[in-house]
Amino acid sequence: MSASMASDADIVLSATGLVMRFGGITATNNVTLNLRRGARHALIGPNGAGKTTLINLLTGVLVPTEGNIRLLGEDITNLAPHRRVARGMVRTFQINQLFDSMTPLETLALVVSQQRGIAAQWWRPLGASRAVVGRAVQLLEQFHLGDVAKQPVKQLAYGKRRLLEIAIALACEPRVLLLDEPVAGVPAGEREELLQTVAALPADVSVLLIEHDMDLVFSFADRMTVLVNGTLLTEGDPDTIANDPKVKEVYLGHGAVEDVHV
């Protein structure tokens, strides 16, 4: 196998020439992005850069005006969002969307049941499937939720809710995980636990992180893509991005890149 073929085989998510127009406004302008197997890839840019539009294109919320998207070699450009999830692309949402009246244990058991094709049996007593409960408990421990496993979600601290949200995403057994601003709104006292959990995500899951917190971005990412005004400004490893004059100019006055030690 040639080097180029091996390289292509290593790409799990590929967006090529994505354009998204809303009337006369071009929100995404010819953006190409490749997410490699096992990557920790960050998507950054100032407000209005087009990050949310790009993620909505990748996840199927929007259909691009031009361009195509491939997941594990399959063209998914026009595929519905839930079908992308079934094929291994899962997104956490910036705005937390959880079942408030359920407990974390019940929530994860339901998601695991759905993933294993037995969601129709959700009404059976919790514990009817040892495999389902075992996986749910494993996720609770992995995401530091064991102590709140039986509390209603609505009673959880915000940081715990964000941890549960990521646990739900992982329960879907993703090949590609889109982390949508995981620490947004999380109080300082709860951030460290969440950051450690994000850093410990399974190596076989390819992660695309959308985040404003530059400390998290530079500690997590092995590759970074910078968007400005819907256009790809540059891409590279964290050292390259931190020292790129164009990136510094974009963030000048924001203290985002200059203050990060990499």
Image (spheres, rainbow, N blue to C red):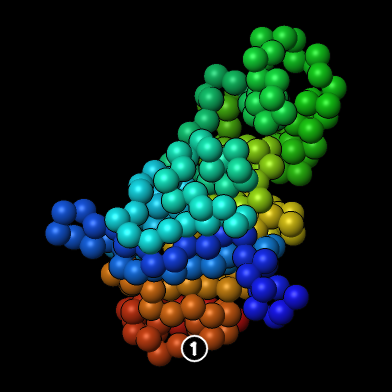
Q: Residue at x 58, y 80 (%)?
A: 237
Q: Work out whether 181 lies above or below 124.
A: below
- For the C terminus, give its image quadrant: bottom right
- For the N terminus, give its image quadrant: bottom right
Q: Position of residue 254 (x, y in %)?
A: 35, 74
The one of 249 and 53 positioned closer to us in this rendering: 53
Residue highlighted by disc 1: 243
Question: Can residue 188 be seen?
Answer: no
* Secondary structure at numbered mark 1: loop
Q: Quadrant of residue 167?
A: top right
Q: Residue at x 18, y 60 (%)?
A: 25
Question: Can residue 16 be seen?
Answer: yes
The one of 74 and 116 positioned closer to us in this rendering: 74
Q: Position of residue 53 (x, y in %)?
A: 35, 55
Q: How many marks?
A: 1
Q: Position of residue 175 (x, y in %)?
A: 66, 51
Left or right: 95 in relation to 120? left
Q: Amino acid at mark 1?
A: Asn
Q: Residue at x 67, y 67 (%)?
A: 10
Q: How many neighbours does mark 1 have within 10 angstroms: few (below 14), some (14-19), or many (20 or more)? A: few
Q: Residue at x 78, y 26 (%)?
A: 132
Q: Work out whether 166 lies above or below 42.
A: above
The one of 214 and 192 positioned closer to us in this rendering: 214
Q: Quadrant of residue 248?
A: bottom left
Furthest-top residue in this view? 124
Left or right: 45 in relation to 129? left
Q: Work out whether 71 lies above or below 173.
A: below
Furthest-front residue in this view? 1
Left or right: 249 in relation to 210? left
Q: Position of residue 58 (x, y in %)?
A: 46, 53
